[in-house]
Amino acid sequence: MTLTDLIDDAALFSLEHQLHLVDVLGEHDWHADLRAPRLEFIGPEKTLVCERFHLLGTAAPGPRSWLWAWANSSGFPEELTRLSAELRAHGERLGIPELTRAEIPFAELPKNPEHPVQVAFLFAEAAKALSGCWTFYTGEVSGGTRVAFLMEHPDFMLPAPEPARTMRVIQQALADLPLSNHRRALSSYAALRGFQQQTTPDGNGLILTGPGFDVRADFNDQGLITHLNLTAHPGQ
């Protein structure tokens, strides 16, 4: 198991949660009280308050490094940093050094991320895959440093799967995310979203079956998607 594997495992299910978060929050400002603890998302029509969230760490442009919350000397409440410490234990068990070292330079991460937002995203993806907490938020705190949270709130739960949304998630993931193995990422998404999945008769593809639709993906020898097709089954 590697950090790259975790990122592929989380990618599509994570993306769907982030798209849903955008729908829920809309245009907004944010404010965090880490002592309360309390996260507020303040929009023109409503304020959403999240009181259950987890501080993962910070990505800083000065030292160009990620610092885990469990290693931060700022004295954050233990309840906020507990999940990051649990990820450290997972890293020790799985042999993933990026989860066990207190501080990791950007240059040592997969895909060579240049920006703190990209780094916060990578570690959030790994955290999602191991924790089962799927909604992520990052905000700038000072001098370009990005803080990363995982959050829990009833409004962040996904609605039932729907054909067009499912295709959008897959297509956007292929276009925008730093995936290494499309087959692994798609199979993981199917398992997490509750889709049935089966290998095509020729062994070169996967068929995902959701409520009223099938998605077929064909792969090349490198595990990359070469063809994607949606078949809807109205009335099922």
Image (cartoon, rainbow, N blue to C red):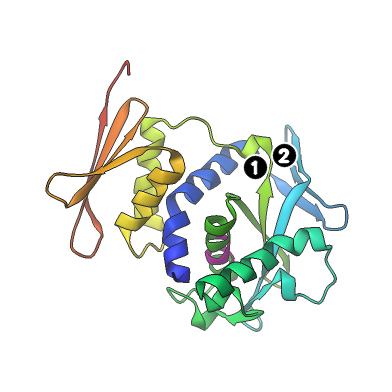
The image quarter containing residue 11 is bottom left
Which element is circle 2 on? loop
Q: Main secondary structure of the magenta part?
A: helix
Which residue does the image show at 52% across and 74% down from the upper left?
Answer: 96
**Circle 2 residue:** 43
- As drawn, 199 above or below 160: below
- Horizontal arrangement in the rendering, residue 64 relative to residue 210 (left or right): right
Label placed on residue 27:
1
Which residue does the image show at 36% across and 46% down from the upper left?
Answer: 170
Report the residue that reaches farthest toward the right.
36
Report the residue that reaches farthest toward the top.
235
- Measured Cα–Cα span from mark 2 to mark 1: 6 Å
Q: Amino acid at mark 2?
A: Gly
Span of residues in magenta = 120-124
- Horizontal arrangement in the rendering, residue 46 relative to residue 180 (left or right): right
Report the residue that reaches farthest toward the front.
93
How packed mark 2 is, by other alpha carbons closer than 10 Å (few <14, some 14-19, many 20 or more), is some
Residue 230: image location, x then y, percent: 26, 35
Which residue does the image show at 55% across and 40% down from the upper left?
Answer: 20
CB contact under 8 Å: marks 2 and 1 = yes
Nearest the viewer among 115 and 81 is 81
- In this figure, what is the number of numbered marks? 2
Quadrant housing the N terminus: bottom left
Q: Amino acid at mark 1?
A: Glu
